[in-house]
Image: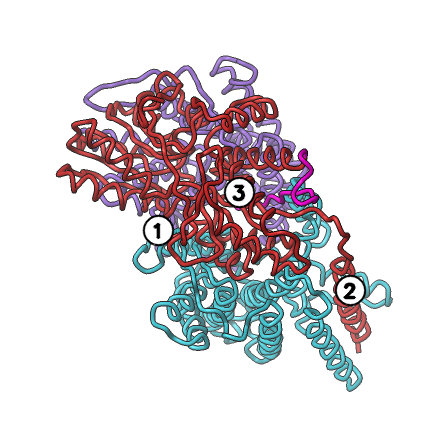
């Protein structure tokens, strides 16, 4: 019988390798934990892909906060380490990242992510693993409305920001026709779903609702269509990579209308990528450098020293999230069992009251949402002018 | 009407890029009989080379364009020697996996060396506008279309009249016969790979200033390039050009008159329809399979 | 002959026992997660192997069947409240229909044309999932999908259900390829024209291969969603089809064990390579190229060659179907 021995050999090899690899892996995982092992914090964010830039800022904010906390001696005598997992702005990758952080790295707490779609996808994993999560950036309403007891958010939600922007614009300008060009995601749709009705309630018109997908580069077709409808203002419902292209291409097409935007469009990266096309654009912002708050001043100084550039909102939000985590972990105390420890941290988070931070004080409501203020700013000659609140 | 003309112009710009990328893909298939799954990455690397020459080294835009094309021609030859040669004559599956290995290598190599962040690639022509008949575009966009047409014309002359061009045509008709006729197949293979890579570099350097440059730009490009290549007929140079412009216009007009949702589907709908109705492409004739 | 059979059964029992013990020995949730994904990818790779390895029809649209299965099962359980098993059944049926839909119009296509057609098919399915907002919620995906069963809490539970499913499906596939039908498929792979002359109905068998392959991929999709409980279109890009094909080819196509080794091998290899950090994918790319140049018929082919040299036997040329 030709091949009998061959097959036997192959099969034996197979079984042996399965057993050996199983034992090897088991050996690794059974390593005894030492007493003062550092506290692990998992971070999910887009470190590659279309939102790699803001993702990088987010990472820097976290690195800085971790360094500061460790320099002070850590939390309850333990150092902390941040484990970063990339989701490339893709929900499925985000789920895998959450899966890895909660079950392989066994982190105490998760911070992240950037895209609402990603958080909505992976929050089921952190909830299942009963791991507390602080979400510093993703703004979709559903994140804190789904009854997830382990989710906390230290930034203003989409509706909070968008209605503030809409109110400001409708009150201060006499625009009649509005156009919206937004990202085809929870984030973009969430913006359109609040902005559109606000405009209509004020008796004004929405003349165009166009969409695009993350990663798109050419918006001439959509913008040409919008131009022909003659709006007074264009709301860009998206992030900075695509947002900057839209602003530039709008200028190229001679679409000279008031541009409006949210969150990400107030960052210096956006300004750089726009190359001047953002002149006059009005947008919301969670964080501004030009305030008297000593916490902000200290943060700006330390960030400038470490990274050689001033921080922006995503760095600030992520930085603040680490300090919120620090407070909760400190209050939660030591626990031998990871599940109990996670639960204690969650309960401590829920009880946080008026914790000072670089984006203002944090108090979580019963849904895990913090009541945060937003600024309204306008780009003028590569600088931001604060329009609201006035007097700052 | 204004809307229509503007959208046609938009479509021509997209079409130029599709045509330039698809030309390389179709030439490599025609001559070497293999599909290069890393061609989108070659285009991306070309855009980065153009960016480095123009922005980091401060060369004039046209010098950077020509420089990128030359550097990428050498790159194409290296790829032919190192990757295509060992795969030549191998079954389809091996070619797919082999060139795919190259594609993963180039994509993540770019992530590693250039970083994942998108970068601006400003050229002097991105801030000059042309406004006529109520339509508006930058000089850079016009440049994309004009340079593409010039490159296509030069390529056509080369293939029709130059000795090597003729050799390429002979190889694409019958590699074995061409070899028997004394054509040095290795030379032809290298020249083809060089031209394909330098056309991709031209596409990257032309389009870079209009959009942004980042490693991920290769992914969207390659799907479209396949659709164009099939519509024009695999291995058909004229077909790739016509099909490139057709797809660009179809996409742009779809957004204008139907919906922006459908923009990405157009390419693949065209692809499948062509394959079902006439796999040889719009210019193809049915060939009878020989036993 | 008898010894051979006995040995096979022995090996099978060994594998089953090892698998049953795996989640107990390996406590780390993440390695259990990889094992569950290994089972799902084994189904995908084995089903693609039927199309590519046994019938010789090179397809890059397999992720489409996977996606159709995943979405069908998710929507049936989520929107219509069907039980999970019924969702799975629905997923396999609809994926099978898509198999016929892809198999029939592409009958005339060969080689590169077939590859690109299947690639286009995969992209269209993904784009429809992405843009049919009212049904699929587009890029946001579907969340809160029913878990496999109320008692399926840990990853070990999933592994203990999915691994036997994978084993049974692979054994059925083994029966199929060694049957009269399997011989017809292999004949088509070796020489279409000759097969036709011998009276094999090309159209029937090709569509059959696509359909059976699609049904199994649909099942895999269903297993995937009830495990991850989330699904979005970007789980099914062309890259996913390519990944499955890599598993088949690197493992050794046209063999039963090859795709399974490829599936588990690549899932665990990519994980082990995390130690290489940012160099991981760069090195993976080079590895793929080197493997395919040095081992054109995959690991199984290489193993067979090496062992036949060791045992001083002649190399059997055609891939063994057993």
Residue A23's tag is: 2
**Could you tell me which secondary element the residue under label 2 belongs to?**
helix
Magenta span: A71-87
Q: Are marks 1 and 3 in contact (CB under 8 Å)?
A: no
Relative to C235, residue C90 above or below: below
**Relative to C158, residue A339 above or below:** above
In the image shown, does B234 or A303 lie closer to the viewer? A303
Kindly identify which residue carries mark 3: A324
Q: Is residue B232 above or below residue C21?
A: above
Farthest bottom residue? C2
Residue at point 55% right, 72% down? Answer: C152
Residue A77 part of the magenta segment: yes
Q: Is residue A184 left or right of residue C201?
A: left
Q: Measured from the top left, where is residue B172 in percent x and y?
A: 52, 41
Asked if one can make out residue A225 in the rendered structure from this viewpoint, the answer is no
Q: Is residue B204 above or below residue A30?
A: above
Q: CA gap, disc 2 to disc 1?
A: 50 Å
Mark identifier at residue B151: none
Report which residue position mark 1 lands on. B269
Badge 2: chain ID: A
Circle 1: element type: helix
Give the letter of the chain under mark 1.
B
Query: According to the rendering, which colour does chain B have?
Result: purple
């Amino acid at each position: 019988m030709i091949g009998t021995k061959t097959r036997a050999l192959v099969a034996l090899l197979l079984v042996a390798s399965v057993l050996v690899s199983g034992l090897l892996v088991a050996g690794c995982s059974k390593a005894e934990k030492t007493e003062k092992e550092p506290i692990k914090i998992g971070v999910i964010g887009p470190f590659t892909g279309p939102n790699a830039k803001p993702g990088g800022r987010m990472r820097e904010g976290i690195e800085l906060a971790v360094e500061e906390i460790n320099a002070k001696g850590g939390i309850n005598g333990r150092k902390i380490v941040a484990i970063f997992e990339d989701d490339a702005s893709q929900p499925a990758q985000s789920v895998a990242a959450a899966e890895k952080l909660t079950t392989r790295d066994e982190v105490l707490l998760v911070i992240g992510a950037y895209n609402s779609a990603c958080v909505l996808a992976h929050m089921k994993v952190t909830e299942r693993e009963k791991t507390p999560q602080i979400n510093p950036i993703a703004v979709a309403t559903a994140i804190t409305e789904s009854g997830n007891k382990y989710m906390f958010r230290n930034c203003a939600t989409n509706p909070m920001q968008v209605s503030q922007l809409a109110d400001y614009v409708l009150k201060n300008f006499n625009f009649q026709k509005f156009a919206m060009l937004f990202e085809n995601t929870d984030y973009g749709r969430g913006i359109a779903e609040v902005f559109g009705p606000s405009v209509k309630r004020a008796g004004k018109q929405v003349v165009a609702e166009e969409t695009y997908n993350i990663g798109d580069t050419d918006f001439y077709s959509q913008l040409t269509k919008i131009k022909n409808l003659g709006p007074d203002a264009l709301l860009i419902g998206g992030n900075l990579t695509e947002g900057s292209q839209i602003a530039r291409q709008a200028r190229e097409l001679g679409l000279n209308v008031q541009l409006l935007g949210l969150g990400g469009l107030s960052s210096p990266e956006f300004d750089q990528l726009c190359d001047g096309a953002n002149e006059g654009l009005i947008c919301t912002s969670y964080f501004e450098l030009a305030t008297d708050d000593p916490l902000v001043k200290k943060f700006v100084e330390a960030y400038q020293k470490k990274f050689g550039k001033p921080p922006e909102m995503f760095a600030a939000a992520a930085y603040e999230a680490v300090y919120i985590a620090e407070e909760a972990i400190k209050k939660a105390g030591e626990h031998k069992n990871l599940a109990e420890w996670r639960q204690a941290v969650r309960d401590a988070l829920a009880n946080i009251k008026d914790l000072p931070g670089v984006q203002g004080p944090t108090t979580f409501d019963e849904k895990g949402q913090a009541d945060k203020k937003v600024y309204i700013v306008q780009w003028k000659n590569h600088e931001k002018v604060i329009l609201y609140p006035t007097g700052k | 009407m204004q809307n229509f003309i503007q959208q046609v112009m938009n479509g021509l710009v997209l079409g130029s890029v599709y045509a330039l990328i698809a030309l390389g893909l179709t030439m490599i298939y025609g001559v070497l009989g293999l599909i290069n799954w890393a061609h989108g990455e070659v285009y991306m690397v070309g855009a980065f080379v153009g960016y480095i020459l123009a922005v980091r080294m401060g060369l004039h835009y046209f010098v950077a364009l020509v420089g990128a094309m030359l550097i990428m021609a050498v790159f194409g030859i290296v790829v032919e020697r190192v990757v295509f040669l060992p795969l030549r004559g191998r079954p389809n599956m091996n070619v797919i996996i082999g060139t795919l290995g190259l594609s993963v290598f180039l994509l993540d190599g770019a992530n590693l060396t250039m970083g994942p962040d998108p970068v601006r690639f400003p050229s002097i022509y991105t801030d000059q506008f042309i406004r006529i008949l109520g339509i508006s575009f930058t000089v850079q966009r016009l440049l994309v279309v004009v340079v593409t047409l010039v490159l296509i014309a030069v390529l056509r002359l080369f293939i029709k009249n130059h000795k090597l061009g003729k050799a390429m045509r002979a190889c694409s008709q019958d590699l074995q016969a061409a070899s028997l006729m004394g054509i040095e197949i290795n030379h032809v293979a290298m020249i083809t790979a060089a031209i394909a890579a330098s056309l991709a570099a031209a596409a990257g350097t032309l389009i870079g200033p209009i959009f942004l440059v980042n490693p991920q730009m290769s992914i969207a490009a390659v799907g479209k390039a396949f659709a164009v290549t099939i519509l024009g007929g695999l291995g058909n140079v004229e077909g790739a050009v016509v099909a490139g412009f057709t797809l660009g216009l179809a996409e742009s007009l779809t957004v204008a008159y139907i919906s922006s949702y459908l923009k990405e589907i157009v390419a693949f709908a065209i692809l499948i329809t062509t394959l079902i109705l006439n796999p040889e492409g719009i210019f193809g004739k049915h060939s009878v399979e020989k036993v | 002959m008898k010894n051979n059979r006995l040995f096979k059964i022995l090996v099978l029992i060994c594998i089953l026992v090892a698998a049953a013990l795996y989640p107990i020995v390996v406590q780390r949730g993440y390695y259990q997660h990889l094992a569950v994904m290994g089972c799902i990818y084994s189904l995908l790779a084995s089903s693609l192997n039927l199309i590519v390895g046994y019938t010789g029809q090179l397809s890059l649209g397999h992720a489409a069947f996977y996606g159709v299965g995943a979405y069908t099962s998710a929507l049936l359980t989520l929107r219509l409240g069907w039980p999970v098993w019924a969702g799975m059944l629905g997923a396999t049926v609809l994926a099978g229909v898509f198999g016929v839909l892809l198999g029939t119009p592409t009958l005339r296509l060969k080689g590169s044309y077939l590859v690109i057609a299947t690639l286009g098919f995969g992209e269209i399915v993904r784009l429809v999932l992405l843009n049919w907002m009212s049904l699929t919620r587009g890029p946001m995906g579907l969340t809160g999908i029913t878990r496999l069963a109320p008692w399926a809490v840990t990853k070990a539970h999933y592994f203990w259900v999915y691994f036997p499913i994978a084993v049974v499906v692979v054994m059925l596939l083994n029966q199929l390829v060694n049957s009269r039908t399997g011989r017809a498929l292999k004949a088509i792979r070796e020489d279409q024209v000759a097969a036709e002359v011998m009276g094999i109905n090309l159209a029937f068998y090709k569509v059959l291969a696509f359909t059976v392959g699609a049904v199994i991929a649909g099942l895999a999709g269903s297993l995937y969603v009830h495990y991850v409980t989330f699904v979005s279109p970007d789980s099914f890009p062309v890259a996913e089809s390519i990944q499955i094909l890599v598993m088949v080819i690197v493992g050794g196509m046209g063999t039963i064990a090859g795709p399974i080794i490829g599936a588990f091998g690549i899932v665990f290899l990519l994980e082990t390579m995390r130690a290489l950090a940012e160099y991981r994918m760069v090195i993976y790319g080079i590895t793929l190229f080197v493997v395919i140049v040095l081992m054109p018929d995959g690991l199984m082919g290489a193993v067979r060659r090496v062992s036949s040299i060791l045992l001083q036997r002649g190399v059997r040329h055609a891939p063994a179907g057993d």
